[in-house]
Image: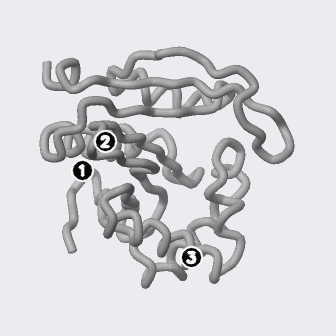
Amino acid sequence: MFVRSLGDGAELRPLEPWQAEEFFAHMERGREFIGQHIGFADAAKDLDSARNLLQRYADKTASDTGRIYGIWLDDKLVGGVIFREMDVSQGRAEVGCWLEPAATGKGLITRAARVLIDWAIRERGMHRVEWLVSSKNAPSIAVARRLGLTRDGVLRSYFVHRGVRQDLEVWSVLAPEWES
C-alpha cells in the first residue's frame, strides 16, 4: 500500500473493500452533506452496499478503468477522490471527489485532485482529464477553477439527482496545459 502526504496531517491512500466499515462510518457522518450533489452517499446506504461500491472500484482498478482513494485527516477517513472513468486507449480520465463537512475549507480536495491529475497525465499518459459537476455544486466548481481547469460547457438538464433534474458542467485540462 502507498501513502501520499497531503500536508497538515492529511494523507491520500487507496480505499479498498476491506475498509468498508470505515468507509460506511464516514458516509454516515457526511451522508446529507455529501449527498447534496453526488450519488456516493445514496449508493453506500448500508455496509453491504458500501462494500459493493468499493469492490466495483477494486474491479475498475484491476481492469485499469477507474480508481478510488481516501483522504485521511489525522488518521480519520474524511473524504476521497476517484477516477470515475479511465479510458487509457483514448487518453481520457474523469476525476471526482467528495468530503464530509468537518473536513471542508482545508484545501484537501484541491491537493488530492492535483495528485490524481498529475499522475494521470505524467505517469499514465492521459491527454484529457475531465471534471464533471452539477452547476449547483459551487465548492466543486471552485476546485476546478483552482486546479486551472477550463470550463468546456454545460449540458443542460442532463441528469436527475434525488428527483431533481440537474445541469452538468464539463471542465477539463489537456496534457500540454497541465505540463505548462
- Label 2 element class: helix
Q: CA distance from mark 1 to mark 2?
A: 9 Å
In this rendering, position of residue 5 left or right of residue 70 = left
Q: Which mark is residue 47?
A: none
Query: Height in image: 120 above or below 179?
Result: below
Q: Is residue 154 left or right of residue 161?
A: left
- The residue wearing badge 1 is 7
The earlier-in-sequence mark between 1 and 2 is: 1
Q: Are marks 1 and 2 in contact (CB under 8 Å)?
A: yes
Expressed as whole percent of the image width and height from the top left, the position of residue 16 reads: 40, 75
Q: Which residue is mark 2?
A: 111
- Find residue 135 and report its image quarter: top right
Residue in view at x 28 percent, y 39 percent: 117
Mark in front: 2 vs 3: 3
Q: Regarding mark 1 in the picture, which secondary structure is present there?
A: strand
Q: The disc labelled 1 sits on which kind of residue?
A: Gly
Check contact, mark 2 vs mark 3: CB within 8 A.
no
